[in-house]
Image (cartoon, rainbow, N blue to C red):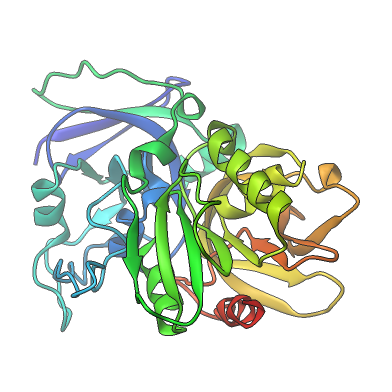
């Protein structure tokens, strides 16, 4: 195992060993505290441009499921067609794996998709550094491998444009109700959740002007990066909102874009929310839900217009976890009700949306 070193922008170094594809890589270093779900997280487009640190110490012990594709073109077990994280950082990689659905090791998968992996890192100390300093750019260099790699500021890149579909894709054609899915980096399980509810899905690129199409509602997906890079999507939403009161539902990046379309602002969190155990409270109630989350930006509640109000709030730091319009059927959440991976406590929000159509 070759020596691999993680070097943060502040000069902090963490030395370990390489167990993935051996190439230098740079990106925003973030941490995820989930205990399981690395196949889903690695293929989540929202991790584009990031070096993913897993705080759970043992990783790889249940291998990787097969990368099979259903007849509708959606992966059976993954959240997209490939790994989107730039690299994986773990404390203890398990070479041995055992699971009824595993077909290969995590290391072989990373190598096949040319994604670096580094093990032997003190991920608790790394997480402490990121919590105290905030997320920062970093790079991984491999011993005896050319280490010249450019580090581009994370917020300066439109990652949504990199991961969004490039043409219109339809699912469940002929269903009674039709929704427009604005693809900012949609996870496969969002499409599965919508399909199970019997609606036709018209998946369009993030900057596609869908307002001339026939539809009954709009869904805005999750996605990576800074929402300020997605001005075209915000403009299209504002146009649609000015033309009709048709229902709108957004998740993650969709929450931020709907808020911006309504006139609010977003800001970058110090170290983001990436875990399976984020508690959120529904506004005006004592109902609390445990949610799966993966975001580095949040909506600024103080900038919401008079027609909008918070829908959920985070019980750890008080940040916004959802918004709704006071009189129109427009709402969104910052967390992931589709989970994959994580708790499914809030999947009922898909039902709430479909009932509005």
Percent position (x, y) of residue 309? Answer: 83, 58
Residue lying furthest right in this view? 306
- The answer to whether residue 317 is seen in the rendering is yes
Q: Residue at x 38, y 28 (%)?
A: 138
Judging depth in this view, the residue of 270 and 66 nearest the camera is 66
328 relative position to 334: left or right: right
Residue 80's x, y, as percent? Answer: 29, 58
User: Compared to 289, does 88 lie above or below?
Assistant: above
Q: Quadrant of residue 188?
A: bottom left
Q: Position of residue 103 (x, y in %)?
A: 9, 71
> Relative to 2, is 333 above or below?
below
User: In the picture provided, is 248 more to the left or to the right than 8?
Assistant: right
Up/down of 186 relative to 143, above or below: below
User: Image point 31% across, 50% down: which residue?
Assistant: 90
Quadrant into which the C terminus falls: bottom right
Compare residues 243 and 313 and report the one nearer the observer: 243
- Residue 126 placement, left or right of 26: right
Quarter of the figure with residue 327? bottom right
């Amino acid at each position: 195992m070759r020596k691999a070193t993680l070097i943060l922008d502040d000069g902090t170094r963490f030395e370990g060993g390489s167990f993935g594809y051996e190439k230098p890589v740079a990106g925003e270093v973030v941490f995820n505290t989930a205990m399981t779900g690395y196949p889903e997280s690695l293929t989540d487009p929202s991790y584009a441009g990031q070096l993913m640190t897993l705080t759970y110490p043992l990783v790889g012990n249940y291998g990787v499921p097969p990368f099979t594709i259903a007849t509708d073109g959606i992966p059976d077990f993954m959240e997209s067609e490939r790994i989107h994280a730039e690299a994986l950082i773990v404390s203890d990689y398990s070479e041995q794996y055992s699971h009824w659905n595993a077909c290969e090791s995590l290391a072989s998968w990373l190598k096949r998709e040319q994604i670096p992996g580094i093990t032997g890192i003190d991920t608790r100390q790394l997480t402490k550094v990121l919590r105290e300093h905030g997320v920062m750019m970093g790079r991984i260099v491999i011993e005896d491998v050319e280490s010249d790699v450019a580090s581009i500021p994370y917020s300066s890149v439109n990652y949504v444009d990199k991961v969004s579909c490039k043409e219109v894709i339809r699912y469940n054609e002929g269903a009674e109700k039709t929704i427009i899915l604005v693809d900012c980096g949609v996870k496969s399980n969002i499409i599965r959740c919508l399909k199970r509810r019997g609606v036709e899905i018209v998946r369009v690129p993030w900057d596609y002007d869908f307002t001339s199409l026939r539809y009954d509602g709009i869904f805005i997906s999750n996605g990576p990066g800074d929402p300020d890079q997605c001005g075209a999507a915000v403009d299209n939403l504002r146009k649609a909102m000015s033309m009709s009161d048709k229902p709108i539902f957004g998740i993650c990046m969709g929450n931020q874009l709907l808020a911006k379309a309504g006139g609010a602002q977003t800001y970058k969190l110090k170290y983001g929310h990436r875990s399976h155990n984020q508690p959120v409270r529904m506004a005006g109630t004592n109902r609390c839900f445990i949610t799966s989350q993966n975001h580095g930006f949040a909506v600024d509640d103080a900038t919401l217009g008079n027609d909008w109000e918070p829908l959920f709030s985070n019980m750890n730091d008080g940040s916004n976890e959802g918004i709704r319009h006071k009189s129109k059927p427009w709402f969104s959440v910052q967390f992931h009700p589709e989970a994959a991976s994580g708790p499914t406590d809030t999947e009922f929000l898909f039902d709430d949306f479909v009932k509005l159509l």
